Amino acid sequence: MTTLHPDPPYEKPTPHPKSRFMALTSNCDDMPTLFVDTHAPLDVLYDAANYRIRAVTQVLENMSMRGSIDCESFILSDFALLCAIPLRDGCDVLDVLGRRLRGMSSE
C-alpha cells in the first residue's frame, strides 16, 4: 500500500519584471497557480484575451435581452463573480499584450 506524504512547504513565487510567467490577478489566494506566458506569440495572447472577454459579453448580452430577472442578491453576487473572473483574466492578458507591443515600438 502506498503511503501518502504531505506536500513540501510552498514558496510563493517572487514577481520579477523579466519573468516569463505572470500570475493572473484572479488567482484565489496569495499562492498563484494560474499564469500567463508573457513570451507567447502575440496572436495567441490576443486570442486568449478575446475568447474570455467575448464569452462574458455574450452571457451579459443574453441576460440583457431577457425580461425581468427575479433572484436573490447572493445569486447576483455569484453571477457577478462568475463574469468578473474571465474578464479580469482577459484584461491581464491584454496588459501583457500591450507591454509587448509597446516594447516593440521602442526598439
Image: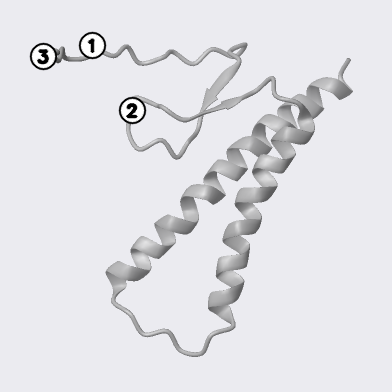
- Residue occupying the point 73% across, 39% down: 46
The answer to whether 106 is drawn above or below residue 48 in the figure is: above
* Quadrant occupied by the N terminus: top left
The answer to whether 68 is drawn above or below residue 4 in the figure is: below
Q: Earlier in the sequence, mark 1 or mark 3?
A: 3
In the displayed structure image, the side of residue 9 where residue 4 appears, left or right: left
Q: Residue 91: x, y in percent? A: 61, 43
Foreground mark, 3 or 2, reads: 3
- Residue occupying the point 80% across, 28% down: 101
Residue identifier under label 1: 9
| Helix, strand or loop for disc 2 | loop
Identity, as a three-letter code, of the amino acid under mark 1: Pro
Q: Earlier in the sequence, mark 1 or mark 2?
A: 1
| Helix, strand or loop for disc 1 | loop
Q: Quadrant of residue 104?
A: top right
- Residue occupying the point 55% across, 42% down: 89
Residue identifier under label 3: 1
Q: CA distance from mark 1 to mark 3?
A: 25 Å
Q: Nearer the viewer, residue 54 or 96?
A: 54
Q: Residues within 10 Å of mark 3 (few under 14, many from 20)?
A: few
Residue identifier under label 2: 30
Identity, as a three-letter code, of the amino acid under mark 3: Met
Image marks 1 and 2: residues in contact by CB distance under 8 Å: no
Q: Residue 64: x, y in percent? A: 56, 79
The answer to whether 48 is drawn above or below residue 17 in the figure is: below
* Quadrant occupied by the C terminus: top right
Give the total of numbered labels.
3
Identity, as a three-letter code, of the amino acid under mark 2: Asp
